């Protein structure tokens, strides 16, 4: 007999897209995800609640107590759970296997998570599968999104930004060594393991990832990801490889240091033209070495395969 669990979660704020906003203060927008700064800050103040009710496989509820809904997407829900015997907290990501897109997202995320083991990548503990759903039991990250910390602080110091970027680039180096390209790297998909300032950063959400069984870079052609973080190769419809993740990391570095987005986002065509031309301005005061590392990783033409992590490691010495 299946177990039914229900609980409430504050409904996310909807972003008003009817008003044009200047690029320096516009955060990326993703389907089903709140990224507006005000929405993030006031999420807990929203009184509108929606009921979440779902049926869990009895194998899951036999091992875990379901505690709370902590996230949702087009094909998934994330719940906080507690192991019945050890009382250790985990997160369970429920992936809905419906339609071609849903099946592909499940196959991709499960395939990647089963292959990886790295301190800066979300860890898969175990899996439960049914014909229409996959339950991914993951380590629980309680420190919130990188985006939320940037919004709260306005911007990062060079020291804090460098520390964050080194952790992310370490995870990316590992993924790329396995032939895995994330393809949707952004602050919303980077979680802190705990709320403290010394927390490690974890790369999450591999639904759009792709990999080569040969374990080295190869040419991809699918246009996917979040528009504000797309590399010129993707926008221009050209073959691309793992360098697109380094481009996205360059965009993230800009966000951390300036507290703003690098490109004009008043319309999708303007955004893509700015990406293709490398049209941006950098108003934040940073050291020459930080600026050089950031510029090389992001704004050389066509996302040259430069290792940002190498530049950052030199800076951090």
Image: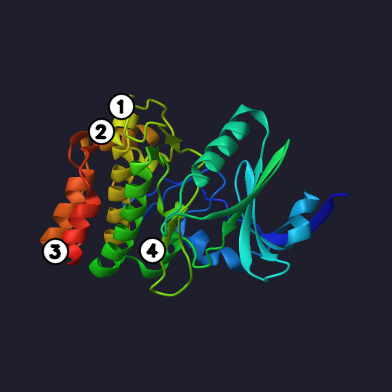
The answer to whether the residue labelled 1 contacts the one labelled 3, judged by CB atoms less than 8 Å apart, is no
**Which of the 4 image quarters holds residue 267?**
top left
Q: Position of residue 194 (x, y in %)?
A: 48, 70
The residue at the point 44 percent across, 33 percent down is 224
The answer to whether residue 274 is left or right of residue 89 is: left
The answer to whether residue 295 is left or right of residue 203 is: left
Residue beneath disc 2? 276
Q: Position of residue 270 (x, y in %)?
A: 32, 35
Residue beneath disc 4? 150
Q: Position of residue 253 (x, y in %)?
A: 28, 55
Residue beneath disc 1? 236
The residue at the point 29 percent across, 68 percent down is 160
Element class at badge 3: loop
Q: Residue furthest left?
A: 288
Question: The C terminus is located in which quarter?
Answer: bottom left
Residue beneath disc 3? 287
């Amino acid at each position: 007999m299946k177990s039914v669990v229900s609980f409430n979660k504050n409904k996310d704020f909807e972003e008003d897209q009817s008003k044009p906003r200047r690029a320096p203060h516009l955060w990326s927008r993703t389907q089903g995800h709140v990224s507006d700064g005000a929405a993030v800050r006031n999420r807990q103040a929203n009184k509108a609640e929606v009921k979440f009710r779902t049926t869990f496989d009895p194998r899951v509820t036999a091992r875990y107590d379901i505690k709370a809904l902590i996230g949702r997407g087009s094909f998934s829900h994330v719940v906080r759970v507690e192991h019945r015997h050890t009382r250790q907290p985990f997160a369970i990501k429920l992936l809905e296997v419906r339609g071609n897109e849903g099946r592909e997202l499940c196959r991709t995320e499960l395939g990647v998570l089963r292959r990886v083991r790295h301190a800066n990548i979300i860890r898969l503990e175990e899996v439960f599968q049914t014909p229409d759903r996959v339950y991914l039991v993951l380590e629980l990250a309680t420190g919130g999104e990188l985006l939320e910390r940037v919004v709260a602080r306005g911007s990062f110091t060079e020291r804090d930004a460098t520390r964050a970027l080194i952790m992310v680039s370490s995870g990316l180096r590992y993924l790329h060594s396995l032939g895995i390209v994330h393809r949707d790297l952004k602050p919303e998909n980077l979680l802190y393991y705990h709320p403290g300032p010394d927390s490690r950063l974890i790369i999450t959400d591999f639904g759009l990832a792709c990999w080569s069984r040969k374990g080295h870079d190869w040419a991809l052609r699918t246009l996917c990801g979040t528009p504000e973080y797309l590399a010129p190769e993707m926008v221009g419809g050209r073959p691309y490889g793992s360098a697109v993740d380094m481009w996205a990391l360059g965009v993230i570095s800009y966000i951390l240091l300036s507290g703003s987005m690098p490109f004009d986002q008043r319309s999708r065509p303007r955004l893509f033209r700015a990406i293709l031309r490398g049209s941006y301005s950098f108003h934040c005061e940073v050291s020459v070495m930080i600026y050089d590392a950031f510029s090389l990783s992001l704004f050389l033409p066509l996302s040259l395969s430069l290792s940002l992590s190498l530049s950052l490691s030199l800076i951090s010495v």
